[in-house]
Amino acid sequence: MKIQEITLRLLRMKMNFSFVTSFGSIEDKDFILVETKSIDGISGWGESVAFYAPLYNEETVQTNWHIMEEFLIPLLLKNEINHPDDVSKLFSPIRGNNMAKAALEGAVWDLYAKLEQIPLYKALGGEKKEIAVGVSIGIQNSIDELLDLIERYLSEGYQRIKVKIKPGWDIDCLKAIRNKFPTTPLMADANSAYRLEDIELLKQLDAFDLLMIEQPLAYDDIIDHAKLQKELKTPICLDESIHSFEDARKAIELGSCKVINIKIGRVGGLTESKKIHDLCKEKNIPVWCGGMLEAGIGRAHNIALTTLSNFTLPGDTAASSRYWEQDIIEPEVTVNNGFITVPERIGIGYTPNLDYIEKLTTYKKTYK
Ligand SMILES: O=C(O)CCC(=O)C1=CC=C[C@@H](O)C1C(=O)O
Ligand SMILES: [Mg+2]
C-alpha cells in the first residue's frame, strides 16, 4: 500500500455540555483530523484525541501537529506499507507522542480496510455485531443535578454509569447515587486526584459495590496502585498509566490493577491496542474502551476496536448526539437499549460529512 498524500485538518467543535473532571474542564473541542489518500484516490480517516491543553496527558493539538508534520508524515510518505501493523514499527524510532501516532495509524487502518473492501472491525479480528456502552458523567454543580443526569442516561438505556470523583466530590456523591440507584452498574474515575496517603478514604469506596475505581493515584504510577489494590476490594482500573503493551505487562505482573481501560490514542494506535487486548485476555484481565470526547471518526475507531472478544465491560463510547448538535459522520452513532450496532460497511463504517468538516476546519495542509 503506497500512501500518496496526507491532509491534516484542524477543527473546532462546540460541545453540548462542559465536561468537568478533577484536572479541569473542556467546552469547545479543538482536534486534528487525518486523511490518508491512496494512489487511486481512496481516503482513510483518523482523529487525534489530544486535547488543546496538556491536562490529561502531555500531548496537545499543537504538539501532535508538529510531530506529525516533522517526523511521522515523512516516514509514512517515504515507505511502502504492507499492512497497518507495519506503521507502529515504522514510527518506533520516534519516542512517545502516542496520540499523534495513533491518529495517523488509524487513518492507515481505515484506508487498508477500504482497499480490502472489508469493515475495519473485521480487519482487526473483531467479532461482535453490537457493543455494550455506558456513559461517563463529569463533575456537576450539585449532587441533585448529578442524580437527575444519571436518571436521564439510564432511561436512555446506557448500561453503566461512570462518575468523575475528586477530593470533596466522592463519598457523599457515591452514597447519594447508591441510595437512589442501589443496583446500577457504577464506577468512579478519579483521574489521578488521590495519593496513597488517602488510603483510608479510598477504602470507604468498597462500601458502594463499584465495578471498579479508575486511576485513583498518580498518572505515571503503577507501584502505589499495586499497594492500594492489595488493600481494596474494589478492582482498580488503570487508564493514564498504561501507554503500551509493556506498561500493561508490568502493571499486571505487579498487581497494580484488575481491569484496563484501552484508549487507542493513549497507547499509540490500534495495533498496540490489540496487543494489550490479547495480553489481558490471556491474563484474565477484562478490558473496556475509554473515550476522549471523540467526534465521529474517533468514535467509529472505538466501536471497531470494541468488537474484540475481551472487551467484556461496557465502554465510554456514547451516542454522537450526547456530545454534538451535529456529528461529522453519516449516519451518526446511535445507542439503542445500551448497544451500538456495529456497521457492516467497509472501513470505519461511517461516511465523513465533507461539507460539514470543511465548515468546521480552521486550518488545513496537505503533504505529498
Ligand atoms: O465520554 C467520553 O468520551 C469519556 C469521557 C472521559 O471519561 C474522559 C475524557 C477525557 C479525559 C478524561 O477525563 C476521561 C477519562 O479519564 O476516561
Ligand atoms: Mg479515565
Image (spheres, rainbow, N blue to C red):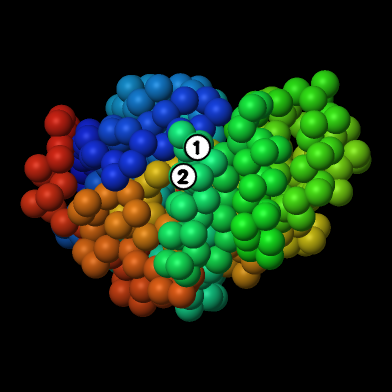
**Residue 111: image location, x then y, percent:** 31, 58
- Name the outermost residue toward the right: 230
Q: Are marks 1 and 2 in contact (CB under 8 Å)?
A: yes
Q: Is residue 152 visible?
A: yes
Residue 300 location (% of width, % of height) = 37, 59
The N terminus lies in which quarter of the figure? bottom left
Q: Which residue is identified by label 1?
A: 142
Q: Residues within 10 Å of mark 2 (few under 14, many from 20)?
A: few
What mark, if any, has residue 145 been given in the picture?
2
Query: Type of residue at label 1?
Result: Ser
**Label 1 Cα neighbours within 10 Å, binned few <14 / some 14-19 / many ≥20:** few
Q: Residue at x 12, y 50 (%)?
A: 356
Q: Amino acid at mark 2?
A: Glu
For mark 2, give the secondary structure: helix
Would you place residue 69 above or below residue 360 in this image? above
Q: Is residue 239 left or right of residue 365?
A: right
Does 318 sit above or below residue 240?
below
Of the pair 204 and 102, the residue shown nearer to us: 204
Instruction: Specify the quadrant of the image occupied by residue 202.
Output: top right
Give me the residue at 67% from left, 38% from top.
Answer: 172
User: Does label 1 point to a residue whose CB lies under 8 Å from ligand 1?
Assistant: no
The reply, left or right, for residue 48 in relation to residue 256 is left
Q: Secondary structure at mark 1?
A: loop
Question: Is 57 on the left or on the right of 152, as rendered?
Answer: right
How far is disc 1 from disc 2 in space, using C-alphas? 5 Å
